[in-house]
Amino acid sequence: MQLNINGESRTANADPSMPLLWVLRDELNLTGTKFGCGVAACGACTVHVDGQPVRSCVMPVSAVANQKIRTIESLGTPEKPHPLQAAWIAEQVPQCGYCQSGMLMAAAALLDKNPNPSDAEIDIAMTNLCRCGTYQRVRAAIHRAAKTMQSPTDQKGGAA
């Protein structure tokens, strides 16, 4: 099966009913997406499918074969982190870190749709669970990233 993952065509030899999460992790070695609950409740497995955040643990790979899939591996690099990744560090969001890739992908989808969300809009969009309880820091990091991304010298194409 051909998949479009992070802008590249990838071949996966998987059963069409296999959840996307396991195809990403076990077939394609993209291990940034995490398994948390297996029932789409926690969000550790959040990826983008055609720009929408989805819980990959319950998404059959056959349902996304002709769509653009984006994982945490494409969000930024160590040399050039995405503004959300930089804000996550600045606001000291990660504690244990396990849920962070899903949180970052959900936050990226939010900022793609709404470049300046209110606290209430963040709370509605961020349905991911964090056992460490860093929700206030997540909210602060999203606001910080939004401000950075709106700057004319942001990390997407400027002098920052």
Image (tube, rainbow, N blue to C red):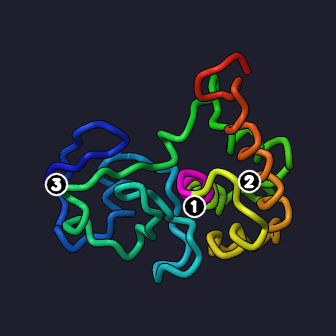
Between disc 2 and disc 3, the foreground one is 2
Does 86 appear above or below 98? Answer: above
What's the residue at 43%, 62% (across, down)?
A: 52
In the picture, residue 14 is in which quadrant?
bottom left
Sequence order check: which comes first, mark 3 or mark 1?
A: 3
* Category of crowding for the residue at label 3, using alpha-carbon neighbours closer than 10 angstroms: few (below 14), some (14–19), many (at least 20): few
Q: Quadrant of the C terminus?
A: top right
Which residue lies under the disc numbered 3?
A: 13
Determine the secondary structure under disc 3: loop
Does 52 appear above or below 133? Answer: above
* Category of crowding for the residue at label 1, using alpha-carbon neighbours closer than 10 angstroms: few (below 14), some (14–19), many (at least 20): many
Mark 2 touches mark 3? (CB < 8 Å) = no
What's the residue at 37%, 76% (across, down)?
A: 58
* Residue 22: assigned label: none
Depth check, front residue: 14 or 51:
51
Determine the secondary structure under disc 2: helix
Which residue lies under the disc numbered 2?
A: 142
Label 3 sits on what residue type?
Asn
Q: Residue furthest top?
A: 159
